[in-house]
Image (tube, rainbow, N blue to C red):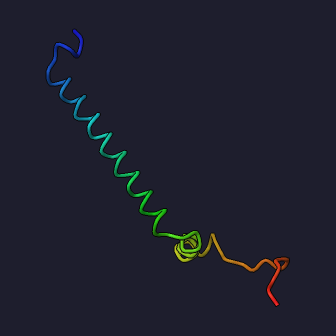
Amino acid sequence: MTSRHVPGVNASIKQMEAYSKMVEQVAKSLQQFRDDNVTENQGRDHMVEKFPDVFEIGVDEFAETPG
């Protein structure tokens, strides 16, 4: 017996495919929102604030400074 002969299975597969497509679109929307509204520096600051024992923002002693 194949899934072609079991209407409930076909309906479940179609629902899962539709759900998968919806989740994919939401994920794309969230990534676009992040890209449009969050800078790299904001991301770094958040990580340092959220995980201070793992991350810290330091100063590069060899970086060129103005003046």
Decide which of 3, 27 is in the foreground and name it.
27
Estimate the x, y position of residue 34 in percent, counting from the top left: 45, 63
**Quarter of the view holding residue 58:** bottom right
- Location of residue 14 by image quarter: top left
Query: What residue is shown at x 26% (from left), y 37% (from top)?
Result: 18
Q: Is residue 52 above or below residue 19?
A: below
Q: Is residue 4 above or below residue 35?
A: above
Between residues 22 and 13, which one lies in front from this camera angle? 22
Q: Residue furthest right?
A: 62
Residue 9 vs residue 28: left or right? left
Quadrant of the drawing holding the C terminus: bottom right
Residue reaching furthest to the top: 1
Task: Give the residue furthest to the bottom.
Answer: 67
Indicate left or right for 40 with 20 as reference: right
Question: Is 14 located above or below residue 7 in the figure?
Answer: below
Residue appearing at x 83%, y 79% in the figure: 64
- Total number of numbered discs in the rendering: 0
Q: Position of residue 46 (x, y in %)?
A: 53, 73
Quadrant holding the N terminus: top left
- Taking the spot 56% from the left edge, 72% from the top edge, the residue there is 51
